Image: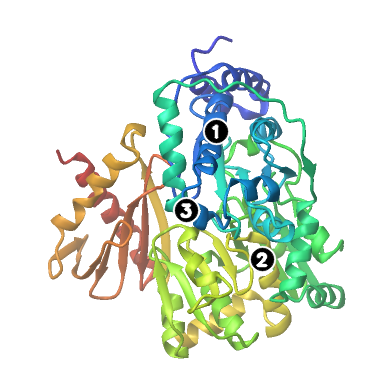
Amino acid sequence: MKFNNARECWKEILSDPASKAGLLSEIAKFARENLEPANIVFGTSGWRGEIGSDYTFNNLRIVTTAIIEMFKEQDASVMEALGVRDIDEIKRRGVVVGHDNRFLGPEFAMSVIGLLNKEGIKAYYSGETITPEFSSSLEELGAACSINLTPSHNPSVWAGYKFNPADGGPAGPEITRVIEKYANGLMAQHAIIPYAPASQYETIDPVGLYLRFVEKKKTLDIAGIRKFIADNDVLICIDHVHGASRGRPQRIIGDSPKVRYFRTNDDYLFGGIAPEPSSRNMKAVTETLRASSARYKLGVIIDPDGDRIRFTDGETELPMNYFGALAFHFFHKYKKLDGIVTKSVATSNFANAIAEKLGLPIRETMVGFKNFRQYMLPGAKERAIIAFEESDGISGYNHTLEKDAIFGLLVAIEMMSMTGMNIGKYLYSVQEEFGFFYPDRAGVEVARELVGKPLTEKLARIKNTLKVGSTVSFDNVTKMVKTMITLDGTKIVFDDDSWLLIRPSGTEPKVRFYIETRSEKEKDIMFKKAEEITRAAIAAS
């Protein structure tokens, strides 16, 4: 078959992933031969693009060249943000380079390492690696920064590029703006960056380094977790959705017939699904737990780069809105940790209710895990005991500055061990004490040309069309606008403390909707109203 571009080819592949995976060779050809420039934007978690269209080998080398140019410039503020003195220190300490297990991952990584070699920068190759392992590897190796080639939970057509400075957290805007400036300058020149062979690199074991990191930090009791599994009637089901998190739990909690693993084989197309931790995707885990008579039951689903996770005990499902708040309560009550809880503005107010009653501070940030850094550094004045966001990301006290699905899994096992309850029962006991909240999220796709500033400007108009004190109709229910929060998108809080948040995605051509109601039956009408407000803002001239 003949295709004019990679997008046409991807459409054909996804029409029947089971029989048309062979066409990935055509995608590889487009990735190598397509020299069209792309607009480089590092959103909430790095640069992402469609493989063969905007994410090509040349554009990957352009972004890597931009990072090297940033190193060479040695701007004092950038060097401070990186956690190094100068480029000589970067050359000596080195860069960790790895990838998830998506199509062309190793080839993309070698293309990056080749350019680092050319500049005399030491390179560590971590191979198939999950996102939190870059953070632990940086600390354990004393490396200067990392390059993580993953688009996280995005569908199979995507590839991505994450950059982390020496502290292991996601790069902030003081770094990514410089990368964008150099990269888009090269794109405007239609630059062609020649291939450079990867001739010198040290291969590392990211799982071993992660385990060493966790045992050193002592926030989690690995020995206690292993003993709990060995001594009790337990069934744990882990769905890896063909992602790079496979094999990690066995190394950490040990092999056991009480732990079952799902979808661990290679599949670049993820069985034709979007590999996100969703309720629909964890159906097999839920059904397996329901059929079991085990005393303790836990199921999780983890995204391809191991930074998002969702939980169930077979009866109750816990997205991060619930689990993050529960982890906060657990760390304070059972692990006796004091500090603050931090969450994104799009996250449920369940944690707020717990914090208020416990007399502990809560800090809300813009969406994006990088915004938690100031509360998670070891020397932070206000130090988080849990940091989480509604999009299934979590980390905690004395742990990585990146969100970490394996951390979430280990915390959930410790919850069962220390509370004597399955997580659904534990959740209900906390809800009875602190209140019931019903969060959810959805969204709509928009034209690709709107991504970035045009979409942000259109959605900013919402705050001018709805005012505090005005009323909004929801079918036969009318609510008054109590508060408008424009920290990240537009959050409209109503007089019954229900709310909706509308914001552009930082990485995809989508508008995100986040809602919270005080009754389950109001969810549909809240989503309907969010879409109505969004489409009106986009359509306005």
The amino acid type of the residue labelled 3 equals Ala
Q: In which quarter of the image is residue 446?
A: top left
Give the class, few, some or many, for how many residues have Cα within 10 Å of label 1's Cα (few <14, many ≥20): many
| Residue bearing mark 3 | 76
Q: Which of marks 2 and 3 is in front?
A: 3
Give the class, few, some or many, for how many residues have Cα within 10 Å of label 3's Cα (few <14, many ≥20): few
Dot 3 or dot 1: first in sequence order is 1
Give the class, few, some or many, for how many residues have Cα within 10 Å of label 2's Cα (few <14, many ≥20): many
The amino acid type of the residue labelled 2 equals Phe
On the rendered structure, is 420 left or right of 70?
right
Secondary structure at numbered mark 1: helix
Residue at point 69%, 30% (across, down):
107
On the rendered structure, is 466 left or right of 201?
left
Quadrant into which the C terminus falls: top left
Dot 1 or dot 2: first in sequence order is 1
The amino acid type of the residue labelled 1 equals Thr
Cα gap from disc 2 to disc 3, whole angstroms: 34 Å
**Residue 65 - label:** 1
| Residue bearing mark 2 | 407
Q: Which of marks 3 and 1 is in front?
A: 3
Dot 2 or dot 3: first in sequence order is 3
- Residue 106, given in percent of the width and then of the height, sits at 71, 34
